[in-house]
Image: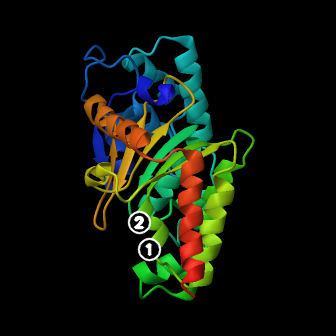
Amino acid sequence: MTSMMARSGGGCLPVGGFVAGCVTFASAPTSSPSGGRAGLDVLGARQVLVVRGRRGAGGVVCAGLMDAYNVTDPTERAAIEKLSREARQKGWWSRYVNVVDPAYAAYAAVEWDASELYNVETNLVPGLLQVPEYTKALIQLQVSEATGDHVEAQVDVRRERKAILTRENPLQLWVIVAENVLYHQVGSRDVMKAQLESLLADSRKQNIELQILPREDPMNACLFGPFVIMSFPTSAETDVVYTESPTSTLYYEDAADVETYTTLFRRLNMAAANVSKSRALIQNALHEMEQGR
């Protein structure tokens, strides 16, 4: 987890302001180049360059932004220029812009760029570890008026997102799940059986560390809601904390905010069962479900 702790900077934006923030930053920077930023942070470089399928900065604009923000290190400049080039290429999520919420598409774009992801889930199986049947049942529960086409599109997007775990440079995923999630029935018993069995299989994969926070552990009192911390492969890119609620989606980049969530993740990591004991807890939930038939 050391790389996650090393980078910070920026602020907080509702996802609705994600694209607007690109325009504001690019046209009228409000921070002085000497005002405490060593270089472009995520709200700068990433928002201007990396809202995939929406906009990107050309070479001249990119160079000008880096000069304005005193980015002189050749490695950082090369990394940001690479982001600029990639931002002008459409990602897989661009195929779904008409069927999914823009906020979800923006999240998928940022997630795809991450090299490490730290996820705490309090009520649901993490999206990257959901089986299609679980995702389908979940969407039908959460959006009762959803059409069949909408449900299938959401399942397809989730399937595309999961490719991040098996790509050439797979995402390193650390997940902490509250034990109660294993007993929240989403869909039929067959769906839950398939989901729990899939979690057991995922827990054995080299790039996935899955921990369960036991129900009796006092740290459950610190679970205020799900959150994600994303780390990126170069020092030019700051860590991003993502949180959501039924009415809002936020990205945090301020050093103090990132450290707050990082500290909470560390505490939960220490409190949660280790990988082998977590597997046993999943197996227990699966056994109890089968016995209850």
Dividing the picture into quadrants, the one containing residue 229 is: top left
178 sits left or right of 279 in the view: left
- The residue at the point 60 percent across, 70 percent down is 195
Q: Label 2 belongs to which residue? A: 180
Q: Amino acid at mark 2?
A: Asn
Q: Which mark is residue 129?
A: none
Label 1 secondary element: loop
Image location of residue 215, percent across then percent down = 37, 59
Q: State the residue position of label 1.
A: 184
Q: Is residue 261 above or below residue 235?
A: below
Q: Decide which of 150, 115 is in the foreground and name it.
A: 115
Q: Residue at x 44, y 66 (%)?
A: 181
Q: Is residue 52 visible?
A: no
Q: Given the image, on which type of amino acid does mark 1 rest?
A: His
Whole-percent x, y for residue 182 in the image: 49, 67
Q: Is residue 33 left or right of residue 201?
A: left
Query: Up-down: is 19 above or below 198?
Result: above
The local crowd at label 2, few if under 14, some if 14 to 19, many if 20 or more residues have their Cα within 10 Å, is some
Q: Position of residue 245 (x, y in %)?
A: 31, 62
Label 2 sits on a secondary structure element that is helix
Residue 112: x percent and y percent?
58, 47
C-alpha gap between disc 2 and disc 1: 6 Å
> Mark 1 and mark 2 in contact (Cβ < 8 Å)?
yes
Q: Quadrant of the C terminus?
A: bottom right
Residue visible at 29% across and 60% down in the picture? 248
